[in-house]
């Protein structure tokens, strides 16, 4: 039995991602925040941490990426994708017209902007996670409060599901990476790289002309297909940026991968290999 950390409580999308990836026969630990979860992973209090990193409607999830980019010992060994179908949840015998406030995780609220446009009498209210917002409105026990969460969260707390699929995008999905603590990534990746399909990394370039294009050339000269590239403020100095890159490494041998990593490290101010893992395919 493994100890698996996720953010939120049972019924949150992160708990669904954790259950889907690991199966029920494990010890699942819900966290209030990602920093504490990353620290517990570092201290060995949990074996794995499940972090949302990207949503198909709202984009990169920097609440987690900004922590993970500076965690040198945490390494992603897997990926899972969860279909995020948001439900409008309320007390029994409540209608949409009764609602004045709808609570949910800010990420979930921002995936349902059209719903709030259509129902201007409802004020969105940020809450810690989607499933906890269901617990909260149950405690408040007032028909003016609703929540946005998974159907699992609604059913778990015997609440009324007023509408299903209220998110803006019908195919709304969140991508999660599964991290574990690895003492020496350079040794570890050689074991996992052989049959893996994706590599994720974060880097900060030198402050010189053409620094980014030089790095991109390293990838292209070795025939690596970049899947995504996102710039993000370093938060160390104002208006300085780092880059998150996902690369297809399908069919690439370990030696050429090592070579790529040496070249990158050599030409960068900061480089963090975030993980090497197989692409999620079952959705
Ligand atoms: O509140 C939850 O249910 C979560 O699992 C958190 C979270 C997030 O952190 O983005 C996960 C997936 C959804 O995109 C909405 C919220």
Image: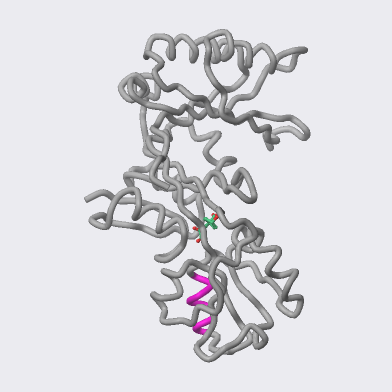
Q: Main secondary structure of the magenta part?
A: helix
The residue lying at 55 percent from left, 34 percent from top is: 69
Can you say whether 124 is above or below 197 in the image? Answer: below
Bounds of the magenta span? 132-139
Establish if 138 lies above or below 222. below
Residue 145: x and y in percent read 61, 82
Q: Position of residue 202 (x, y in %)?
A: 57, 28
Given residues 181 and 125, the one toward you in this image is: 125
Check the image and report above or below for 4 versus 266: below
Which residue: 52% across, 86% down? 91
Residue 159 sits inside the magenta stretch:
no
- Residue 48 sits in which quadrant? top left
Residue 64 vs 97, above or below: the answer is above
What x and y, as percent, mark residue 220?
A: 59, 13
Q: Position of residue 204 (x, y in %)?
A: 64, 24
Task: Give whichever of 238, 127 is nearer the camera.
Answer: 127
């Amino acid at each position: 039995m493994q100890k698996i950390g996720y953010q939120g409580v049972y019924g949150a999308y992160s708990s669904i991602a954790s259950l889907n990836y690991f199966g029920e026969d494990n010890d699942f630990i819900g966290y209030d925040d990602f920093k504490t979860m990353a620290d517990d992973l570092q201290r060995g209090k949990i074996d794995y941490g499940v972090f949302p990193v990207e949503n198909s409607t709202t984009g990169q999830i920097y609440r987690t990426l900004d922590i993970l980019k500076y965690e040198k010992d945490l390494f992603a060994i897997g990926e899972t994708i969860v279909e995020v179908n948001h439900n409008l949840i309320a007390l029994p015998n409540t209608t949409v017209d009764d609602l004045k406030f709808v609570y949910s995780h800010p990420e979930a609220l921002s995936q349902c902007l059209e719903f709030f446009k259509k129902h201007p009498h409802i004020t969105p209210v940020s809450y810690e996670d989607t499933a906890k917002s269901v617990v909260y409105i149950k405690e408040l026990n007032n028909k003016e409060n609703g929540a946005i969460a998974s159907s699992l969260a609604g059913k778990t707390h015997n609440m009324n599901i007023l509408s299903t699929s209220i998110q803006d995008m019908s195919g709304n999905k969140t991508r999660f990476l599964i991290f574990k603590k690895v003492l020496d990534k350079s040794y570890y990746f050689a074991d996992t790289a052989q049959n893996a399909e994706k590599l994720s990394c974060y880097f900060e370039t030198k402050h010189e002309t053409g620094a980014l294009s030089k790095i991109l050339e390293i990838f292209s000269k070795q025939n690596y297909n970049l899947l995504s590239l996102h710039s993000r403020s370093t938060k160390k100095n104002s208006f300085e940026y780092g880059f998150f890159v996902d690369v297809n490494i399908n069919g690439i041998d370990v030696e050429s991968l090592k070579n790529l990593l040496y070249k990158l490290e050599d030409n960068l101010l900061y480089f963090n290999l975030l993980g090497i893992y197989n692409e999620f395919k079952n959705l």
